[in-house]
Image (cartoon, rainbow, N blue to C red):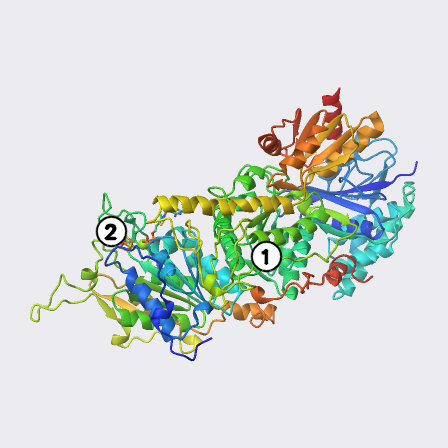
Amino acid sequence: MALEQVVKPSDFATEVHNDWCPGCGDFGILRTIQMALAELRMEPHRVTIVSGIGCSAKTIHYVKTYGVHTLHGRALPYAAGVKLANPQLKVLCLSGDGDGLGIGGGHFVNAGRRNLDMLYVIHDNGVYGLTKGQASPTLKLGVQTKSLAHPNINDAVNPIWLALAAGATWVGRGYSYDIKHLVSLLKQGIEHKGYAFLDVLQPCPTYNDINTKEWYGGEDRKDANSGRPLPRVYKLEDEGFDPVVHEPLEIEKKATQALEKALEWGDRIPIGVFFKNEHVPTFEERILQRVPTYMDNPPALQSIAGPNGEPRTDLTRLVQRMTFKGE
Amino acid sequence: MSKRDLALRVGGAAGDGVSSTAESFAKISARSGLHTWTYSSYQSVIRGGHVWTQVRGGLDPLLSHGDDPDVVLCLNQQTMDVHQADVLEGGAIIYDVDSVKPDPTKIRKNVRLIGISLRKKAQTLSPNALMRNTVALGAAVALFAMDFRHVESAFKDIWGDKKPEIVQQNVAAARLGGDAVKDLGGPLPLGLAYPNQAKYLMTGNEAVCLGALAAGVKFLAQYPMTPASSILHWMASHGPKYGVVVKQVEDELAAMNMAVGAGFAGVRSMTATSGGGFCLMVEAIGQAGMTETPLVAVLVQRSGPSTGLPTKTEQGDLNLALGAGQGDWPRAILAPRHPEECFSLTAKAFNLAEIYQTPIIVISDLYLGEGYRTVDKLDFNVPIVRGMMAADGGTAKDFKRYEITESGVSPRALPGTKGYQFIGATDEHMESGELISDVLAGLPEFVEERRKMHEKRMRKLDGLRKDSPPPEMWGSRNADLTLINWGSTWGAAHEAILQVEEKEGMKVNSLEFPTIFPFHVDEAQKLLRGVKQSLAVEGNYTGQFARLLRAETGYKPDHFYGRYDGEPFASRDIADKILEVVA
Ligand SMILES: Cc1ncc(C[n+]2csc(CCOP(=O)(O)OP(=O)(O)O)c2C)c(N)n1
Ligand code: SF4
Ligand SMILES: [Mg+2]
């Protein structure tokens, strides 16, 4: 799959006009996706990116791979369909937090049960950006962002907890203004064998005036001596956190520490890899048990007709078996 | 008088093994060379309730499951109470003499009471309680004087070669029932000469699956819902051998979106459901219309509204199929009348879906989808046409996924094809796939572009119309009355016509629509010109098809007969209605 020649992020750029607001965190996610694909030396035509609906979902128009801008909340099952039909493709799926955790929440839970080999990224901005800033499922109780008439009356769902509970086998969180770190997370998520979920903290300067770049960066709480900001975001790996399930017996321990870390919010917000477990068979491996030719000759690549449109499926024996076995 | 058909009705509580007993009898009937047709009346319960199945066999092709049966097989007292009065003169009732009592005052003349110690006899062979059904089944086979060889063959079909002891035990049990009939007066004097040449037996849903397989389906995503679930079950057991990936998903939203995603990746892909599930699919099926992605959706209707009567039939989801999804998008709706068409129209749907790059809906119903019918011949050699691909002929440089063409069909590219990357979008887009929905919408140039793009998509309706089967007139020319119907109502309509022609000397014909949409306006108008008087017959309250016909052609049927009590049309009732409107 990987190319020999040098692949540059610009190989994944399109000329499509970009209409995000200036300073939107989505720019960081776009750039890092292009960089990660280039660094992994992916051939653009072998990658398909599926998105839902929202500001976040527009990302795919700016990435020169195959892509589908689907429906609000339905990116995950759509992406699963693409991947199941042709497991030879690299499939990425992008959603907003409303898309993935609100209207598409049921799919979020069920994607974990499958462990299809793909990466799912949520652009986590706490609001419904495209529809002018209503509260999203990740906005905390009592928080009042710009468009809200009253403080948020619902509490937030914790995407990391939910992904772990659903069975995602790789769970990470990135920050859209830490480019280098986010590229590394995207690459790990893409390369993970199984279903990887990446929550990306994505400031929306237009509608979320609480969880801003300045807030994440700690501009509001400068060190008394140095006068430097004290960032809220910190990296798990800097504290020696080991997310990897090295052998199956460790699952409980590693899941528990991931859940513990995922509770941190406010003064300290962890980013990095929370959990990684490659001891679960992927969905592709499970299908292979039933359809031995699945990976080499997947559904989308099977030849179903001869040169003159004659069908290749021979049903005579099946019908005989179905109806008059033994005669 | 010698008869040309027979009917057995098996009744009991859910969990008594009614459907498997009836299914065995249907297989025996088909092996005897009879055209066979079954109908099950059941409920959404796992145990209890009252369920029954009627199996009809005939020397001539059948058109319905028939009316009153020759033999009723009672697996409990309630069956006796409910059905004993229906048994035809000269027929018989089979029951367990130790637990079920007939009421002779309710039974027609000349009906024989075949009381057998079913349970006790079965227990001489095995402690398995369901073997009593097999004893009773053997009694039915003996009453109809069928060849016992077919019993063994049917059991082998059901239990497979892997369980020869079960097959042998059941054959022995059936023989006990057969022997009991000898002591109770022997076979009924029906005088049927069985051809003993086996026929294919399948449900409409199985025929849909076969049609899909023949057409090269390799992906099915589905969520269980009666009466479409058997498509999922059948495909799960048979599909993998043919390289088909069968995915049971979390809901119908996922089923449709996943099937569309698979179609986008290039596989022949399908989903199936009933009305409730289809309601959840409408946004996603419209998405396939907008992104020009091939897909086949099978809608097996049951009684609505809402959860309705899950195990009862209806033709009430036509408006749903016609109106599914926001805005206008090109679709075809094909309505098979019988299993042969379940097979052929499903296979055709896959070609239409790929040629026109849009969803095709195959609409059937519980009566057709779940009932067993014998099928004379299926042509597995279905031609496969996969539609226009960009990589065949064009160059990547000029590739425009949504190029505006005269036919409305644009060159398609599949992920994995080098150089043809594009973005499919549910937002309105330009020929390249770029959006015009956001900052460009409303600018004069893009008002024009939107109009052209929408017209391009909708032009596909012309091709779809041309390539789908036109309406058909069946029966006498110059009829006094024309029945207008669609889908599974066909059978009862034909049978009613034959009845009134024979008994009353009337001339009635039937106008049928294997394609519901795009409507064949010209063909329909041509056929309607010869219609003197008409009666629309369909399984819903408002006459959903009759309204479509009127909207498309301006023709308003003179009379309407709708059925919406959950039961399929009976030819007797249609015949009565014909007499009523013509008189
Ligand atoms: C079925 C449906 N309901 C509602 C909408 C309107 N809608 C479009 S985007 C959106 C919310 C987007 O929020 P989010 O998913 O968080 O994405 P963001 O814009 O913040 O990136 C809504 C409600 C829609 N397109 N479809
Ligand atoms: S509304 Fe928010 S999320 Fe959307 S583009 Fe603007 S800044 Fe970005
Ligand atoms: Mg959002």
Between A257 and B134, the one nearer to me in the picture: A257
**Relative to residue B579, is residue A37 drawn left or right?**
left
Q: Which residue is painted at 87% across and 45% down in the image?
A: B143
Between A303 and B196, the one nearer to me in the picture: A303
Crowd rating for badge 2 (residues with CA inside 10 Å; few <14, some 14–19, many 20+): many
Instruction: Tell me where residue A30 sits by quadrant.
Output: bottom left
Tell me the mark number nearer the camera, choosing from 1 and 2.
Answer: 1
Whether residue B121 can be seen here: yes
| Residue A195 image point, x, y percent | 43, 67
Q: Which residue is mark 2?
A: A207
Q: Is residue B93 above or below residue A169?
A: above
| Residue B455 image point, x, y percent | 49, 44
Q: Is residue A114 above or below residue B350?
A: below
> Which subunit holds the residue at mark 2?
A
Outermost residue toward the bottom in this view:
A4
Label 2, secondary structure: give it: loop
Label 2 is placed on what type of residue? Tyr
**Relative to residue A35, is residue B386 drawn left or right?**
right
Between B495 and B515, the one nearer to me in the picture: B515
Q: Which residue is mark 1?
A: B387
Q: Quadrant of the N terminus of chain B?
A: top right
Q: Ligand 2 near label 2 (Cβ, under 8 Å)?
A: yes
Q: Is residue B519 above or below residue A289?
A: above
